[in-house]
Amino acid sequence: SPGMEGPFAEVRAGIALRQRREIAERRYAKQVEQINRAAVRISRAVAQDDALVAGNLSLTWQYSPDDSQSKDRVLDLFRQQVSLQMEEGVDFFIAETFHYLGEALLALQAIKEAGVPAMITFNFKQPAVIRDGHSPAECARILEENGADVVGANSAAAIRYTCCPSLRRSARP
């Protein structure tokens, strides 16, 4: 298809964890693994050797910063998703739309355990802080210190109005 050619093309694969609830509501809960595997296989077939295939993780809606059991559960979910997508041949991961730095760090941990690059993004609101109080610059610094390869924001409004000045301040020359 147009736009898929060239060495810098990207093919995103996998169904974000946040969609797991929607899949369950539609009676596909027992097929989540098969659906994710098929998405990666299709992306790999389209990409061939001309593009990288990105796996995908997203917020789980199960993370609670004050509940250690939720942290263990979320890390386990991320590890499962990373493992099955790695088995099908992803090259790196995009973990996106996080509202909590703690949950983003768990996604980063699962990705780095697999030994592939990680892009982590947040969904900032006004004011430009996430739910656990960190600014875009703080998120970028902490994630970089923990091994993130790319850190950003993925909401057009957040990027335009809240994040860019703060992320620019955190950028290295």
Image (cartoon, rainbow, N blue to C red):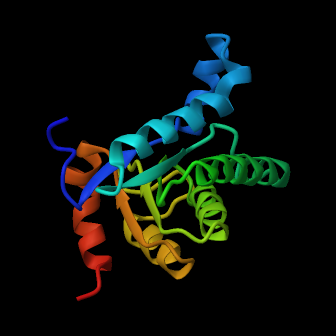
On the picture, is 54 further left or further right than 156?
right
* Viewer-side residue, 154 vs 118: 118
Residue 68 horizontal side relative to residue 151, left or right: right
Query: Percent from the top left, x then y, of residue 65?
Result: 70, 53
> Could you tell me residue 148's position as x and y percent?
49, 72
The extreme bottom residue here reads: 173
Q: Nearer the viewer, residue 42 or 119?
A: 42
- In this view, which residue lies farthest toward the left? 2
> What residue is shown at x 29% (from left), y 79% (from top)?
171
In the picture as drawn, the residue positioned furthest to the top comes out as 26
| Residue 56 x, y percent position in the rendering | 50, 47
- Residue 107's quadrant in the figure? bottom right
Residue 91 left/right relative to 74: left
**In the rendered view of the protein, which quadrant contains the C terminus?**
bottom left
- Residue nearest the viewer, comparing 63 with 55: 55
Quarter containing the N terminus:
top left
Name the residue at 14% across, 38% down.
2
Q: Is residue 123 visible?
A: yes
Q: Is residue 58 above or below residue 129?
A: above
User: Picture quarter containing residue 101?
Assistant: bottom right
Residue 34: image location, x then y, percent: 64, 30
Judged left or right of residue 91, residue 67 is right
**Residue 36 image-quadrant placement:** top right
Q: Residue at x 64, y 13 (%)?
A: 25
At x 60% / y 71%, what residue is drawn? 115
State the residue in front, 36 or 66.
36
Image height of 6 relative to 136, above or below: above
